[in-house]
Image (cartoon, coloured by chain):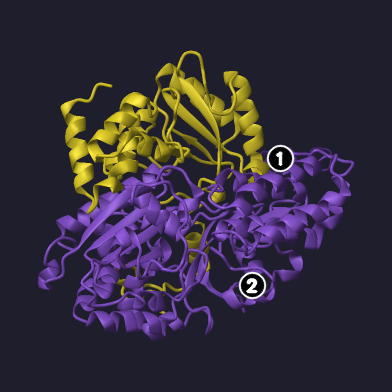
Chain colours: A purple, B yellow
Amino acid sequence: MATPLTPILTAHWDDPDSFTIDGYSRHGGYDALPKALAMEPDAVIGLVKDTGLRGRGGAGFPTGLKWSFVPQNDGKPHYLVVNADESEPGACKDMPLLMANPHALVEGIIITCYAIRARHAFIYVRGEVPHAIRRVAAAVREAYQAGHIGTNIHGSGFDLDVVVHSGAGAYICGEETALLDSLEGRRGQPRLKPPFPAVAGLYASPTVVNNVETISNIPYIIRNGVDWFRQFGTEKSPGFKLFSVSGHVRSPGVYEAPLGITMRELIDYAGGMREGSELKFWVPGGSSVPMLTAEHLDLPMTYEAMAEAGTMLGTATPMVFDQTVSVVKTVTRWLEFYKHESCGKCTPCREGTSWMTGLLETFEAGHGQESDLQIIDDICHQIAGRSFCALGDAAATPFPGAMKYFRDEFVAGTHTSADDAFNPVASTVLAGASTR
Amino acid sequence: MEIDDTTRDEVRAIIARYPETRSALLPLLHLVQSVEGSVTPDGIEFVAEQLELTPAEVASVATFYTMYKRHRTGRHHIGVCTNSLCALLGGDVVWKSLSDELGIGHDETTADGEFSIERIECQAACTHAPSVTIDWEYFDDATPASVSEVIAKLRAGEPVQSTRGPVIRDFRATEHTLAVTDDGLAGEGPSADHRMLAGLTAAKERGMALQDTAAPASSEGEN
């Protein structure tokens, strides 16, 4: 039997006011808050630990464990910083969540801050999405007015301020320490770890950095409990997930399902491949994870199964590409992105992304030299594991992943350009609508 | 640079949001960009004074982030995502058509100061590919024709509605929103459009149960 979809975070997005406090409260919103405030903070951390919730920003680190790393009674202020810098190519689930259900995040922030004893939270939203910023800023304002944020929240003695902060266009700020530097008013470049943010984060104080979707899970968990949460997903990948399915499917969009759903099922829910289209490759969680092919369609979309297949679940935002697509062009464009977004702090990433891009462009243009394929591979190995942060590792990912399944296409790039081999119009949405 | 009293009040309010003043740097750069249309040496000097930093410190930050423009930006800024997925689904075609129509290239501005265009990176709208932004508001599922129509409307002063947001204002107005964050326009546009609702729609069509036990207003599918 097919894995059913499970609208939870998305359950009421078809209400015209789903993004307002009235729309949210109508369906049990802010019911979790008094429940959490009646618990001991450590009990809230313990409960989230018991759910096994893993970070939804890509790395999948256990959320409750991360919270428990914050030292208590250390006399320092603590901070919660929500990472809403969603910029990973392929990922489009946090921005929809902020636009349609921002109060889930706000309620989650209040509960999380209570648990980790933070009095100040920041929501760092990428600057290029003003409508997401205004929706979440309005939600914060409404929560203040309702007394859910501010001083002595609902008589609990707990005080909290929440600030919405706009970024200014830098993919690297999705890396948590670069984000903290950016929030401190500096160039967004990663910091050396350790110390980890839980010990020395924002303003050198203990800080939890969590993804939007992760924190938005919290009210639902508090409301419904550990067993309810664990009925979804697998032992190692519990819970439900927003999957943004994009590319050559009939109905691209946001699909909320338990972890463990297969890509075949997701494509089926998305209406199947577009007319006359055949799957060529897909990428489970953003351009920073290795691609897969049709032989992997029945694997469960879990952290563990994706790792076994040699890739990663990442942000769980699959991109689907059909037979009209040039792998060489796709990978080259991703590398141009990493080159553009490399912060320049460390040499392997700064130089390596530049060299790889230059070489890949010769293959896209149809005059690559076959021996350069080995050089690109060597560069990948020089970057991976030798860079300051995960951006370098990510940049070293698409090429080896593509070579594993489509080496012939790169070899063809020694004599035929990507546009000659694959008519660039055929892959467009317009072509799908008119010529099939 | 002319800074009026309203802007000075906004500067104070922005600085007051943060436990440490330097955190106000990015929002203040958005604010000066909303006044001048770009981040000028004057703007950098002003922000430096407000935060007791040196102009060099502010400039080093301003030049790191792509949204801060160092030369005059058009009244409208149009971005076309040409990262892999959007490019393949039509972004490259849209870009070429837009660039040809306006006769300018990446990061350039038309002679009349109306439009600047930019090849942008992933906009978190892959489900709406090809993604275009007008003054950073979403203009989803773009085609050469839809973008051309928008150019004509903006030139004629006719209203253009973001596909998931408010009526387009101009580049500087958006920069102001980014600085102050709350601009009274949150209610514009739909809660979610058909692509954001694709999963919910598919679930409802199949009669799949709602899972959240504390959702009394629509519990027809009790789990």
Mark 2 residue crowding within 10 angstroms, few (<14) / some (14–19) / many (20+): many
Query: B214 left or right of B19?
Result: right
Query: A249 left or right of A316?
Result: right
Lower position in the chain sequence, tag 2 or tag 1: 2
Rounded to the nearest angstrom, the CA distance separating label 2 from label 1 is 32 Å
Q: Residue at x 14, y 67 (%)?
A: A153
Quadrant hosting residue A413: top right
Mark 2 against mark 1, which lies toward the viewer?
A: 2
Does residue B181 appear in the picture of this structure?
A: no
Kind of residue indicated by mark 1: Ala
| Residue A128, x across and y down, in percent | 44, 42
Query: B161 left or right of A138?
Result: right
Q: Residue at x 12, y 69 (%)?
A: A154
Quadrant hosting residue A288: bottom right
| Residue bearing the label numbered 2 | A306
| Residue A53, x across and y down, in percent | 44, 76
- Tag 2 and tag 1, C-beta contact below 8 Å: no
Query: Disc number at residue B92?
Result: none
Could you say whether the residue bearing mark 1 is in a helix, strand or loop?
Answer: helix
| Residue A314, x across and y down, in percent | 56, 65
Q: Quadrant of the C terminus of chain A?
A: top right
Query: A399 left or right of B101?
Result: right
* Closer to the camera in the image, A436 or A65: A65
Does residue A251 appear in the picture of this structure?
A: yes
Are labels 2 and 1 assigned to the same chain? yes
| Residue bearing the label numbered 1 | A431
Image vertical order of residue A281 relative to residue A223, above or below: above
Read off the chain for label 1: A
* Closer to the camera in the image, B46 or B26: B46
Kind of residue indicated by mark 2: Met
